[in-house]
Each structure stands twice: as C-alpha cells, then as structure tokens.
Amino acid sequence: MEIRVVKRQQPKNKPLDSELGFGQYFTDHMFVADYNPDKGWHDPRIVPYGPFEVDPSCMVFHYGQAVFEGMKAYLNKDGEAVTFRPFFHIKRLNRSAERLCIPQLDEGFVWEGLRKLLQLEKDWIPKSEGTSLYIRPFIIATDPYLGVRPSNTYKFFIILSPVGTYYKEGLKPVKIYVTDKYVRAAKGGVGFTKTAGNYAASLYAAEEAARKGYTQVLWLDAKENKYVEEVGTMNIFFKINNVLITAPLDSGTILGGVTRDSVITLVKEMGYAVEERPLSIQEVYEAHEAGELEEVFGTGTAAVISPVGALNWNDRVIEINEGRMGELSQKLYDRITAIQYGKEPDKHGWIEKI
Ligand SMILES: *Cc1c(COP(=O)(O)O)cnc(C)c1O
C-alpha cells in the first residue's frame, strides 16, 4: 500500500540531548492509518505531528478500547538508525489488539509505516550515550457512539519522542513498595496486554507508594496476594543463590516484555540457571534472611534494567546488595545497550536497520 507523505512546512527546533527527559518532545511527523469494516486498514499516511479532531462521543474516551506499544530506535556507532526486535513489538500489538476486539494489523504494513517514518525523522534520533528515539504505536476506537460494543472504526498512529534515561535517578537503585492492597491484573483479565486501562488502574497505588517515599509498586498476584508479578510497568527478576527467577507468562497476568525475553536469553548464554516460576514474596524475604538474595531488577524498553535497592512489604524493609546496582544487573544493562548501539555483534538477529 502506498504511504502518502505530507511534510511539515517548517521543522521544529530540536531539544538538547541534556534536556530530553522522557516523552516530553515529539518529532515533526507522525504515521496514521484508518480502519473501517469495508476498507480494512487503509489510507496510510505520514503527516505533520499535531492535534486531530474526533467526536467527543468517540468510543475510546468512554470505554478505553485502546492498545499501544513502546519501542526504540537508536543511532548505532556507525551512524545508522536501527530498531531492537521490532517484530516482537508488532506481534505483541496484535495480541493486545485481539484481546481488546481491535482488528489485526498486517505486520509488514506496520513495519513499512514505521520504517518510512523513521527514515524521514532520522535527524531526531539523539546522539548522546543512553539516548534514543522512543516509538509509540497505538490504536484507538473512533466510533461516535455511547453503546457498549466493539467500535467499527479505528485509528492507528505512530508517534516518536526523543528520550534520555527513564528515571531521573538514572541507574541508581530504586526503592519499591510491595502492595497487597491493590492489584494490577487478575487471571482471565488483560494483564498480558498493553492496554490503556491497565495504566490508569495502576496510578493510585503508585501515588500512594510515592507519598511513602517509594519510586514504584511491586505487584503481587490478584488471587492470593502472594506471588511477585511485576514492578510498576516493568517485569521483575530476582537473583537468589546465583539463580535468576522471574514470574511465568502462563497466568496471563504478566506483560511478556521484549527486555524480559532478551535478559533470559543472554543470562542463559552466560551460564546462569533461569527459572520462570511463581515466586512468593515470602520466599524473597526468606532468601534475604539467609543472605541469598543477591540482586533484584526490573526490565523494560524505557529503562532497560532498573535495579531495585530496597523493598518494603508490610513495613518490613529490606536492603538489596547494600542499595547498590548488582554486578549482573550492570552487565545486562551494558550488554543489551551494547547490542542496541552496535558495539557488540548482534548474534540473535535482534537488530533491524531502517
Ligand atoms: C511494556 C511493559 C513491560 C516491559 O516490556 P518491554 O517489552 O520489555 O518494554 C513490562 N510490564 C508492563 C506492565 C509493561 O507495560
């Protein structure tokens, strides 16, 4: 399908790399496509980034039928623009869409739209170490209708935002509040999808944790309030007695992260045992008591690796690795970013040039 391009008259001023932060600046253009039952996904186009009109009764505003992705483009050491495992993201967008009754997108259609947009916006990929161009594909339901049913029409967008590091603390370990008062996802629900409502539902707990001085919430399973699931909007890993443990995906309550999958692959190659199994918070605390809890870290595209320096579970506070980033956490951060920036060979075929 031909992608129409309407260029912006006057390019915007680009922010300095030092003032990027996360998700505050947007590039000159965006990709848009529409869906209706007659034409399917159609009219793919690249147009100036900016506001667009929809009806106030637009279904997404009322019933939250919306899915998204979060990925990154990097400038590698040879100055080429690359993305990391884009088809993992595109497939996951379709899995999220399916669960939310949103029509599937052709993988090649999304990739071509993304490539063309990135080619046009290549100068927006920041150059300093640790910076990248964050890519936010998303789909919203657009029928002007207040009845509850799946929408018949949708819009698909890709917007781009140059970013620095996710947390202002950088790689400094964060303090995490373990909540057994709120839950993120229950079995049979939408925990495995990137749908807007999951994030809306998580804000209150995160705010409460922030008031107590914690950066994020560690979510336990919804049924027993016992097993560790995710940390904030990241997957979570525990290194106990030289074994790396993370929650399994089969419950449908965990978002299957690209970073999670990459960490598992790399760590196995490094010779560690990895266990994807239910891990109770009790077991984590017992491991700490026994001196066997070595490292805890979150994984996600935005932060890559986010070390956890302390946990608070029912006011029992434990410090992990003396509040410092663990050796394996650091090694994983270094290796994943080295692959992304082309400083380490891409043995797994994770890098796609645009
Ligand atoms: C996006 C996300 C992750 C991390 O996934 P990546 O693919 O590694 O970025 C983990 N948990 C939740 C809830 C998420 O939304």
Image: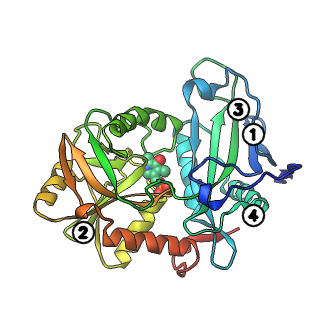
Spatial distance from mark 3 to mark 4, Cα to Cα? 33 Å
Quarter of the image where one finds residue 43: top right
Please state which amino acid type lies under the numbered disc 4. Asp
Circle 4: element type? helix
Tell me what residue is drawn at x 32 percent, y 72 percent. 327
The reply to whether the residue tagged 4 has its Cβ within 8 angstroms of ligand 1 is no
- Residue 153 is labelled as 3
In the displayed structure, would residue 268 be above or below residue 225? below
Where residue 274 appears, as percent x and y from the top left, is 30, 67
Please state which amino acid type lies under the numbered disc 1. Asp
Circle 2: element type? strand
Q: Nearer the viewer, mark 3 or mark 4?
A: 4
Choose the circle earlier in sequence order: 1 or 4.
1
Pointer 1 with pointer 2, Cβ within 8 A: no
- Residue 243 is labelled as 2
Pointer 1 with pointer 3, Cβ within 8 A: yes
**Observer-nearest residue: 9 or 324?**
324
Spatial distance from mark 3 to mark 2, Cα to Cα? 48 Å
- Within-10-Å neighbours for mark 3: few <14, some 14–19, many 20+: many
Please state which amino acid type lies under the numbered disc 3. Thr
Residue bearing mark 1: 34
Choose the circle earlier in sequence order: 2 or 4.
4
Circle 1: element type? strand
Residue bearing mark 4: 123
Spatial distance from mark 1 to mark 2, Cα to Cα? 47 Å
Where residue 307 appears, as percent x and y from the top left, is 35, 60
Tell whether 74 sits left or right of 331. Answer: right
Circle 3: element type? loop
- Residue 318 is labelled as none
Spatial distance from mark 2 to mark 4, Cα to Cα? 42 Å
Tell me what residue is drawn at x 58 percent, y 73 percent. 341
